[in-house]
Image (cartoon, grey):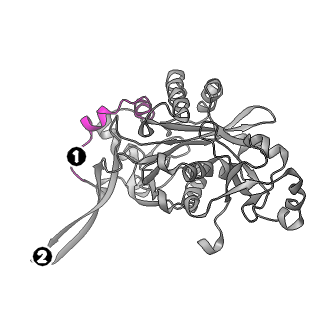
Amino acid sequence: MLVVRAIKAEDLDALYVMATQVGSGMTTLKPDMKMMGDRLNIAVASFAETIPPEQRDYMFVMEDTDTGRMAGVCAIKGSVGLTEPFYNYRIGTLVHSSRELDVFTRMDTLYLSNDLTGSTELCSLFLHPDYRSGNNGKLLSKSRFLFIAQFPHLFTEKLIAEMRGYQEESGRSPFYEGLGRHFFKMDFDHVDALTAVGKKSFIAELMPRQPLYVDYLPQDAQEVIGKVHTSTAPARRLLEQEGMYFEGYVDIFDAGPVLQARVSELRAMRDSTLAEIGPTTDWESACAPEAAAAEPILVSNTTLKDFRMILSQAVPVNGTVALPEAEQQLLRCQSGDTVRTLTLNPRKNNG
């Protein structure tokens, strides 16, 4: 069985192995033992509430309890850009017109921006290829929304997610080759590695502050602005289901889209509900044919220090949910405890 849980100090080795599977383009998950160790220490301190909310980095792992194997990882950063610059390109428009010549042109531009500084960020989503089936990806990605719904006071009102930008099968980034290489004079992977370890001062030092005209870029670079990596497309759809949307901000290296949302408008904030775990004997009613045919639900405990979440076939009824003993153990809950529930997929009448 699979459970998404708060990361622990003893997960470091498995986290490092997971990072070796990721590849380029995800700066928050690099196979660097010191970087991973430092980040894990911050994550443990975050769940223990020993550092301020804006400094926290909540990391979650998906564990296969049958084998003890780490199947995936994801995270929520309390706030970005407060200790180091957080850059994006904002897509804008410049108009040039001449009444005398009867010429009117409207051109897309890229502005180097720090507009998203201070936002809460969803990041580091990676599911091991061996587990990319069924509802596993949804369970991993959407666990963060249930966590935010349970503890909204720990996060800022604006939520963002930087999506991995498009790369060719060879690993080439058309956007970087068409723009970034001219300023940085180094390979994409090298730049990616520098930003991963917090070395970002060169961005301000080397990138132009004036607007960049999109039409001046090579055609293949223009075409991938706001386009996600092929393997990231499912993750984008999941985030959009939960209320996130593209508002014209892209990554400065690969032009991947930055999705954003107001925390108060997330589906999990609107539709998730608290329920009390009923007696184990109630499980028989939850196993009725109509329950078995029901859509799976996300179920989490309400404990910050030991947050845990699973996918269940149980059906909440009148504020009570009957979970089998095995699922209660995964959540480290028992009869009478309170859990938070949310349908795996949005209901049709909710859009």
**Which quadrant, please, contains the C terminus?**
bottom right
The disc placed on residue 93 is none
The image position of residue 109, as x and y in percent, is: 28, 58
**For mark 1, what is the residue?**
209
Asked if 341 appears above or below 17 in the picture, the reply is below
Asked if 120 appears above or below 317 in the picture, the reply is above
The image position of residue 140, as x and y in percent, is: 65, 47
- Element carrying mark 2: loop
| Three-letter amino acid code at the position of disc 1 | Arg
Q: CA distance from mark 2 to mark 1?
A: 30 Å
Instruction: Indicate yes or no whether the magenta region holds residue 173.
Output: no
User: Which callout, 2 or 1, points to the residue nearer the camera?
Assistant: 1
| Three-letter amino acid code at the position of disc 2 | Leu
Quarter of the figure with residue 82: top left
Instruction: Indicate yes or no whether the magenta region holds residue 202.
Output: yes
Q: Residues within 10 Å of mark 2 (few under 14, many from 20)?
A: few
One can see residue 165 in this view:
no
Relative to residue 141, is residue 55 drawn left or right? left
Evaluate if marks 2 and 1 touch, with contact meaning CB atoms under 8 Å apart. Answer: no
Relative to residue 58, is residue 298 drawn left or right? right
Residue extent of the magenta highlight: 189-211
The disc placed on residue 101 is 2
Most common secondary structure along the magenta stretch: helix
Residue located 85% across and 60% down the image: 286
Quarter of the figure with residue 346: bottom right
Q: Residues within 10 Å of mark 1 (few under 14, many from 20)?
A: few
Quarter of the figure with residue 131: top right
The residue lying toward the viewer, choosing from 253 and 277, is 277
Residue located 56% across and 63% down the image: 270
The image position of residue 329, as x and y in percent, is: 79, 40
- Element carrying mark 1: loop
